[in-house]
Amino acid sequence: MQKILRSSTLTLALLASVAIPQAANAFQESPMLKAKVDAGELPPVDERLPTNPTVVDAVEVGQYGGVWHRAYRGPGDRWGPTKLLEERALKYVPDAEGNITLVPAFIESYSVNEDSTEFTFTLLDGLKWSDGEPVTTEDVEFWYNDVFMNEALTPTIDPTFSPGGEPMKLSVKDDRTFTVSFAQPYVYFLNILAKDSTGEPSLDRPSFLFPKHYLSQYNDHYASADELAKAAEEFGVQRWSDLWGSKGPVTSWWQNPDLPVITAWKIETPAPGNVVSMVRNPYYWAVDQEGNQLPYIDRIEHRLFEAIDAFNLMIVQGQIDMQMRYVNSSDFTFYKENEDKGNYHVGTWKSANVWSFVPNLNVQDEELNKLFSNKDFRHALSVGIDRETINELGFAGLGEARSVSPISGSPYFNADWETHWTEYDPDLANELLDQIGLTERDDDDFRLLPNGKRLQIVVEAYQDFAAPILEIAADYYSDIGIELLPRIIDRTQWDDNRDNNNFQIQYTPVDRLSVVSADPRNFMGNDSYAQQYYAWYETDGEAGIEPPADSAIRDIWADWEKASVAGSMEEADAALNNLIGTFVDEGYVIGLVGEVSIPVIVKNDFMNVRNGLVEDDVTRGVGLGQTQQFWIDQSQQ
């Protein structure tokens, strides 16, 4: 696997600049946009681009035009399309060898002071929103003062943006230059910025930027109570603050075609619908190495499907141009056998995910709560299942049995963590369960809880292909006296169950295992095994559930607090490694199969898709491939 560069290599340079074409008149544009220029509907390309646009070194200089055909599963499937176009001030980009590096995006330069307490950014000169309005530090101040520090919209600031408990501060130098600062050193900040931008509320989350000229009309610092109430009624929400957030009808790019963005494409026909379409942004700020304004592709269309069989049929019929999402490893042989029929080829990326069982430490069932909180019970769950069988039958042997821990190639990889509690040992599992006191069994040989009821655990997933995997797991667990009850539910319901603490175990890919310092929150319980504990931690006790005084999750949080204010990368990494080690040793999440070779469907006329990259949420999934440089060979149409 390619190396994932250690955090320190990303922040050593105090200045990063953007290469530019030598002459502005070298800029070219899509015929689609040139027609609008000729019709007087758009200014010329050199007036739409920044003075020195960012240069994306395309694998091969491409051709303009065409529609990228994909598939999606409904309104709740917003993250798939989002990862095609997210932008950050700094982005993870693969170099020629596939190693992940951090490069400037819509900024001209950035600098970091000696003790990593101040980070200064300069926006591209001439950067514009998709409606042609200039992007300036007024938009940065609007983001900070009116959104980020507005308790009505951001009642809780995530710990990753308030190390040591004190939120980042902003100072503006001029129309393009601003500085964010922290009370203490924050050596991981650029990593976190590249992964998570500056957080909610929004969906594509451009770092530090919100379009003031558009969004101020929906903000309580600018609009009256009557105006806000009218806007809420118009968009069909209860409160004006509901207009905001990743699901808000105003700030979600996925729902609002009027929202100005800085991404390569913008929404044209929103969900719900049989086809969701995105159209190129005429003011996108990047060009290829020959001065061609990106993106190459005019539109992206996502066609609705319900069952995975229908999606696979679309692939075989040649209806999918390029897609990784929902392309299942278990169907790898099927995809290969139908390459000629569908006029595509199958590439592979290496997944940073580990498919896992996530027990809910905050489950409302009192008896299960006691068991899930018991380390020996989690140990029994882990050694009571044969991961090699899961890998062969569920992933066509394309993965490996492993725990939830940093993947190989990560600077935080540890071989001992990788194999922690992963050896199939039903005798040990039975011994552990007996020691806990679960010795009584019913007539079907299932163990009984202290209250006399059968030990039943509902495990829920939202992926169709998970069904046979869950059935295999149920067979293994029945051998040690646990009745596992699989449920396949809708993704929206799955998310709601997690958010509302209404699940027992969820089957899911646990990600963010490449550059762990960019987002350690899965290890800390967020959206995972202890969401209510994390809510308590995040809100300083105002929400959620307080963990027991002796809970190891408190050690995990303490180590993050050490890492986030450490004075050096070495000190920060030492604390982060302690955090990971505690998580792995406790076995909070039952990792099954990871580092899977993910099939990537690529039509034979769809160009510039690199093979063998690392797929992770940290590096924004398929976005690591720099989708704006994908192109369609029109000669093969």
Image (cartoon, rainbow, N blue to C red):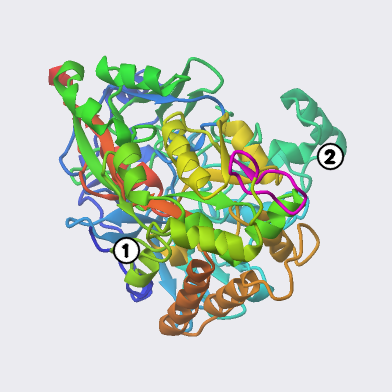
Q: Position of residue 468 (x, y in %)?
A: 42, 32
In the picture shown, does residue 138 fall above or below 119? above
Q: Which residue is mark 1?
A: 17
**Quadrant location of residue 184?**
bottom right
Magenta stretch: dominant secondary structure: loop
Q: Pick the residue in front: 3 or 366.
A: 366
Tell which residue pokes out farthest to the front in this image: 443
Left or right of 556, for residue 303:
left
Q: Is residue 630 visible?
A: yes
- The three-letter code of the residue at mark 1 reads Ser
Give the amino acid type for the residue marked by disc 2 in the picture: Ser
Which residue matches tag 2? Answer: 224
Q: Is residue 563 left or right of residue 386?
A: right
**Looking at this view, is 574 or 475 the one in front?**
475
Report, in whole angstroms, how far the alpha carbon at label 2 lies from the one at label 1. Answer: 42 Å
Numbered range of the magenta stretch: 442-458
- Packing grade of label 2 (10 A; few <14, some 14-19, many >=20) is few
Judging from the image, what secondary structure is the residue with disc 1 in?
loop
Q: Is residue 565 above or below residue 64?
A: below
- Tell me if residue 525 comes above or below residue 449 in the rendering: below
Q: Position of residue 71 (x, y in %)?
A: 40, 24
Residue 244 is situated, as x and y percent measured from the top left of the image, at 68, 40
